Amino acid sequence: MKYGVHTIWRYNCYKKGMKQKFIYVGFICAGVLFSAARCGQSRQITEKKIQTTMQTEDTFPVKKTEEEWKAALSPAEYQVLREKGTERPYSSEYETLWDSGTYVCKGCGSELFSSATKFDAGCGWPSFYQSIDKSRVKEILDKSHGMVRTEVVCAKCGGHLGHVFNDGYGQPTGLRYCINGVSLGFKKKE
Ligand SMILES: [Zn+2]
């Protein structure tokens, strides 16, 4: 016998291993294609449904110098509100807070979102389906980081809050205001 039992066994194992590898690769490819398709779809909807209004710093009523903002905010708050940073997902205590009350801008105190419109989007950031009033936030077209998104800023101080997406599935508006908890304060309803 040219090949021993051991050799045949090893060859079979090798074949089996290759087959498994192909299955894994297949799954990964399918996943990537599915995500890309969903992403493209949501982007199309985003461009269609969300109305953006271009806004410049000069039009916000609350104005402070960078030094004044630095003195008024913590480094983490400053990074998000004034430098358009993003907090780590699941890092905000507000993500899992379900008390009744009002979420206010950390920069100027303006009332922005009601707990009544907060929902669990499972994305790691506090999510709302609408602002308290359309006049409280400004929505700006954001093409940074190779993406087309709609940035949400406080209408009073221009502080960066987060982004709004059209994937608030099952919510009355179909929107998801994905907001950095660090840009918010919370006034609990008595
Ligand atoms: Zn503000």
Image: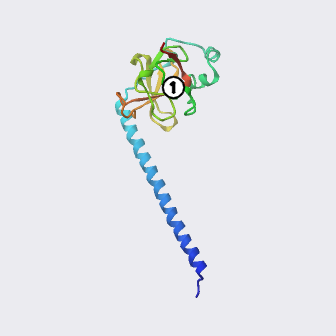
Quadrant housing the N terminus: bottom right
In the image, taking residue 44 as reference, residue 4 lies left or right, namely right
Q: Residue at x 47, y 33 (%)?
A: 143
Residue 48 spot, x, y in % from top left? 34, 33
In the foreground, 36 or 130: 130
Classify 10 Å Cα crowding around label 1: few (below 14), some (14-19), many (20 and above).
Answer: few
Amino acid type for the residue under numbered disc 1: Leu
Asked if residue 155 shows in the view, the reply is: no
Residue 157 spot, x, y in % from top left? 51, 15
Q: Residue at x 63, y 18 (%)?
A: 70
Tell me if residue 101 comes above or below residue 142 in the rendering: above
In the foreground, 133 or 115: 115
Q: Residue at x 52, y 62 (%)?
A: 21
Q: From this viewpoint, which residue is outermost toward the bottom? A: 1
> Which residue in the structure is indicated by mark 1?
97
Tell me if residue 43 comes above or below residue 20 in the rendering: above
Mark 1 and ligand 1: say if the CB distance to the nearest ligand atom is below 8 Å. Answer: no
- Looking at the rendered structure, the number of numbered marks drawn on it comes to 1
Tell me if residue 190 comes above or below residue 123 in the rendering: above
Q: Secondary structure at mark 1?
A: loop
Q: From this viewpoint, which residue is outermost toward the front? A: 190
Asked if residue 77 shows in the view, the reply is: yes
Residue 60 spot, x, y in % from top left? 49, 14
According to the image, what is the colour scheme of the structure?
rainbow
Q: Residue at x 59, y 78 (%)?
A: 7
